[in-house]
Image: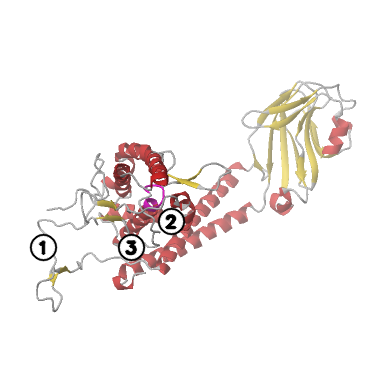
Amino acid sequence: MTTSTYPVHVDGHLDRMLSRGLWLVKWLLVLPHYVVLALLWLAFAVLSVLAFFAILFTGRYPRSIFEFNVGVLRWSWRVAYYAYSALGTDRYPPFTLRERPDYPAHLEVDYPGHLSRGLVLVKWWLLAIPHYLVVAFFVGGGLYALDWADSRAHAPELLSGGLIGLLVLVAAVILLFTGRYPQQIFDFVLGMNRWVLRVAGYAALMTDVYPPFRLDQGGDDPGGGRLVVSPTTAPAPAITPAGAGGTSPPIVAPSETAPTTVWTAGRLVALVVGSLLLLGSIGAGLAGAALGVAGAAMRDDSGFLMRGGQAIATPGYALTSTNIELHANSPARHMPRAVLGDAKVTARPRSGSLFLGIASTADVATYLRGVRRATVVHLDPDPVYRASGGHAPLTSPAAQHIWVAHATGTGPQSVVWPVERGDWTVVVMNADGTRPVAATVSAGVTIPALGTAVTILLWLSGTGLVLAVVLLVASLRSASAASPTRAP
């Protein structure tokens, strides 16, 4: 016989004497918990992926990972119960993954002996979609999501916008003025939280039992404790304390087949650091691979990383770029020529002979003063221009001696320019200075340091992955092998 109606058990006992105004500052008091939980949930996500593959290949949820993930859910529930998911107690939540019988909020999950290998592929996203819709209505779009009200606010809102948050706010206002938390609101809020946490346990692969579409209200879970007794399982032997004369209730001996995983502070630190290293290493590896692919695919025959061509046109006499600032006090000061290398601009005329040149912004302004032209402000997704009215240029562009690099001709024209500090402008004109001007332009740089960057990123990724695996395996094995009497 099974004493539980669902394997995820959620309880909460409402304090009789709640402070009228403490809830106004609880967002500040629980900030240390939010910081720790942010790290623990990161490790939770990493271990859930490992558990996914373990279930897929073995049909079992690794015990040490299971106990840790249950502990994170339990810790989160205690903090949420204290804060703005219930405001059910003024007792500060303990910093521990383990169950605390003396705390008014409890969460337990029955350890599954076996899980379906096939169900693990679909239950956490496809099968749970109906429940996700209900949960979104309850919590406003996220499970215990920390959100900031706006860019000027410094007080976080928990579960903002959902029915839970709304009802807890109503209860808080009533508590502020009457000193009493309405029992009916508390029971309803606990029922919604219980629903949310059942779905969380199911989505975290902790059970194959589909969450019921049932709002079990009240502080006590209708399923009772987590002890599950099956018809084929013999009860654990009872131990009677010496000297009790047989009159005391028996003490049930703990099962040797279901040891309690112990997570000390050191193991938790190793687990969190390993998870951070794992995610960072994956990110570095993806970035290195992306840069390597881009470097191989985007380079032209001259070794320049070129951006695709963009058609530009103006009814005026010239097309110019915006001012390209390369100064000691600009972001480019951190990218010397050894990093950027040379720059290349290519322009293909639609017809006729084209002029392409680069000169200092001051010299271009002097040459094109009073000339009808257009400045290209943005290229993507479509060109945006800033037009200037005026007359035709007094001389052809090739007759000027202001260019640090230029090219003239009837076909595609390219200029290569060693990147230097200063203010620079790119100019596209017809070779004879007539109008209109139309061309397709592209630009690129060599970035000689790209290969080194790819090598460093891939090396960091590989080294980080090795260290992450060592830390994760060591923390999980140590936690599984630790004695329950050494708990933190």
For mark 1, give the secondary structure: loop
Q: Residues within 10 Å of mark 3 (few under 14, many from 20)?
A: many
Was residue 119 drawn as part of the magenta stretch in this picture?
no
Which of the labelled discs sits on residue 234, or is there none? 1
Q: Position of residue 329 (x, y in %)?
A: 76, 50
For mark 3, give the secondary structure: loop
The C terminus lies in which quarter of the figure?
bottom left
Q: Residue at x 82, y 23 (%)?
A: 372
How many angstroms separate mark 2 from mark 3 (CA)?
A: 14 Å
How many angstroms separate mark 1 from mark 3 (CA)?
A: 27 Å
Is residue 142 in view?
no
Name the residue carrying label 3.
Answer: 98
Q: Nearer the viewer, residue 106 or 474?
A: 106
Nearest to N terminus: mark 1 or mark 3: 3
Q: Nearer the viewer, residue 46 or 398?
A: 46
Nearest to N terminus: mark 2 or mark 1: 2
Q: Which residues are magenta?
A: 80-86
Which of the labelled discs sits on residue 37, or is there none? 2
Q: Position of residue 27 (x, y in %)?
A: 47, 51
Q: Is residue 227 rendered to the left or right of residue 444?
A: left
Please identify, in this view, whether the residue under mark 1 or under mark 3 is nearer the observer.
3
Was residue 83 drawn as part of the magenta stretch in this picture?
yes
**Amino acid type, residue under disc 2 in the picture:** Leu
Q: Quadrant of residue 133?
A: top left
Q: Is residue 457 rendered to the left or right of residue 245?
A: right
